[in-house]
Amino acid sequence: MKRRLCSSLIAGMFAVATHAGAHESAHEPGAAPAALMPAPSAAAGAVSGIDVAAMDRGVRAQDDFFRYTQGAWLKDVEIPPDRSSWGAFNIAQDKVEQQLRAIVEQAAADKNAAPGSDARKMGDFYTSYLDEKRRNELGLAPLKAELAKVAAVKDKRRLAALMARFSRIGAGSPLDMAVHQDNKDSTRYIVDIVQSGLGMPDRDYYLSQDDARLKEIRAKYQQHVGKMLALAGHKDAEAEAARIVALETALAQVQWSAVENRDPVKAYNKFSLDGMRGVMPGFDWNAYLEGVGAKGKIDSLIVSQPTYLAELDKLIAATPLPVWRSYFEFRLLSAYAPYLSQPFVDESFAFRGTVLSGAKVKRPLEKRAIAEINRNLSEVLGKAYVAQHFPAERKQQVEEMAKNFLAAFGEGIEQLEWMTPETKKQAQIKLSKISVKIGYPDKWRDYASLRIAPGDLVGNVMRAREFGHAYEVDRLGKPVDRSVWSMSPQTVNAYYNPELNEVVFPAARLQYPLYDANAEPAVNYGAVGISIGHEISHAFDDQGAQFDGDGNLRNWWTKQDAEQFAARGKVLVAQYGAYSPLPGYHLNGELTLGENIADNAGAIMASRAYKRYLKGRPGPVIDGFTAEQRLFMGLAQARRGKARDASLIAQIKADPHSPAEFRVNGSLRNHPGFYEAFGAKPGDKMYLAPSERVIFW
């Protein structure tokens, strides 16, 4: 089981843009209920942190809290034409990109930077990306050597080595590999083999027969494949494209669904190397493991989807070799098109940017360059970013908040009426072992062996991907390094890793508008606190709760408590499955269950943690809102966002996060504190009867 990328940029990229239907109510639209009226006193000079101008007072908080807190913003703000979505996380990311660009451009302008230095690496990568003239002159030439490797495959047994090569250079193939901790022995690293190889976001894009939009996307995808092959000089590109899409469809038919892949027990299948030959007898595992650099370093591996591998073996045998060569050539072209000449860049964006995501224009060249450096020189850039933009006091402030959240979670465990003392004891043990990392790693990755050359963009990207692959594989056989980060400090995101039992909050996540150092703490306990509570709660969601405090996949639940937990999960699945962000599209409550549990539990932890911060003192009233109200408003405004339909459909099909509207309204409908703060009652659209509310922790 890999790390969980959670409530920040990934989820923030997607948000609903439709409005709920009208609802009759006893309250006049815009009229403030008693709970919203100003209290007798307020903290003098305090800054609330609430974006009052973004609110829509014509929407009642008790009917649609998401739009009440940011309806004016949703109506007025247009999604930038180069974006598929826009929201608080994007705004924060834009600010980070500007900061990173200044760092990189300064490095590029430094003529005295020593060869091989961090500054020279950043500068040379940047100038190679911006040099469109050279890219256009080179055309397809930078991929000549890799294309020759594809053409040289004259025997299907050699497909294994080709798949290994494509894993190293990030081009993708029908199976992929990752190195991480063994889920049942968290003291050692192991190789995990996973299904892969599709050119569209999810298998539903290939298999759904009753969705007109997905049928249209399928047709456009086949056209896109043909255009890419034609750009590469193929004479029979359209026919080849049809065969490639047919092959990918066959792969999709035997792949596990996104919901099936969420089950860590089902996805844990350990095989010896001899056993792997039994799963795929026609596949040259020796060549594959040698190609990925793992040969001689492992005696077993994990297969996430063994039935898929068995079917893949049959598919390799049944599919003519020329079709496989066409497929791999397209995979290579698709993976590297953004770094080639303009026709490839344009065609890649036309499908992936516009058809799949809904963006109208490409992002500016400089921003694309910074994003690429951010991916490939993440800790080189991160080290400079932290030095300039992450003050030590912010790290200390959030560390104190995290302590309150951990304590609040412990209180919550003890208050659970449905859990037996035996399971509570085990939950507390796991909670006590959670590690919290904030800001940046204690030690930085060494990039000395990575060569970055001016004027060689494709080579720079390819070598960087191989460097990253080698970094992972080099862990095999070594002690587990618990200091390592799986996300760069300049990433606007956060995650929980069940194998290390850790929550991680990069520096860039802790900035305005997601964190306001000048605001009264109630808003921050909602805005950034929901992320802290959310990530801690992942240790106890339907997946995380199957791991113990040492990161091992082990059942520490009594049968009775496990059944109670599962029953609550079914109620939450039904709640979210009823939400429809777009006509004809409902959320997949099973796919989003883990994130929904974390959202619900995280919101409750935010309220409890803030009360711990207050230590019995009353929270101040500011801008006419009580502290408790501002906490919920901060939570909602930190998840502000809207998305284009194409992006929203992709999220519904493949993303375990619910769209922003339902992350806010869906969680608060189950939160007793929300009812106390805003006086929601029967007849209000946000209201759920107490017997229908779901509380996990």
Image (cartoon, grey):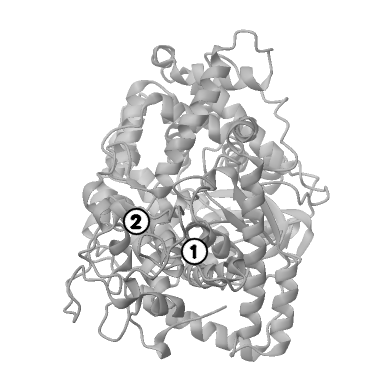
Q: Element under label 2?
A: loop
| N-term-proximal mark, 1 vs 2 | 2
Q: Which mark is residue 256?
A: 1
Q: Which mark is residue 15?
A: 2
Give the vertical position of 290 relative to 36 (above or below).
above
Asked whether the beta carbons under mark 1 and mark 2 sit within 8 Å of each other, the answer is no
Q: Residues within 10 Å of mark 1 (few under 14, many from 20)?
A: some
Q: Position of residue 236 (x, y in %)?
A: 31, 32
Q: Is residue 146 visible?
A: yes
Q: Residue at x 67, y 25 (%)?
A: 450
Q: Amino acid at mark 2?
A: Ala
Q: Residue at x 74, y 82 (%)?
A: 425
Q: Residues within 10 Å of mark 2 (few under 14, many from 20)?
A: many
Q: Is residue 122 left or right of residue 448?
A: left
Q: Element under label 1?
A: loop
Q: Is residue 579 left or right of residue 300?
A: left
Nearer-the-camera pick, 396 or 305: 396
- Quarter of the image for residue 650 reads bottom left
Q: Is residue 250 left or right of residue 472?
A: left
Q: Amino acid at mark 1?
A: Trp
Q: Quadrant of the N terminus?
A: bottom right
Q: Residue at x 47, y 50 (%)?
A: 514
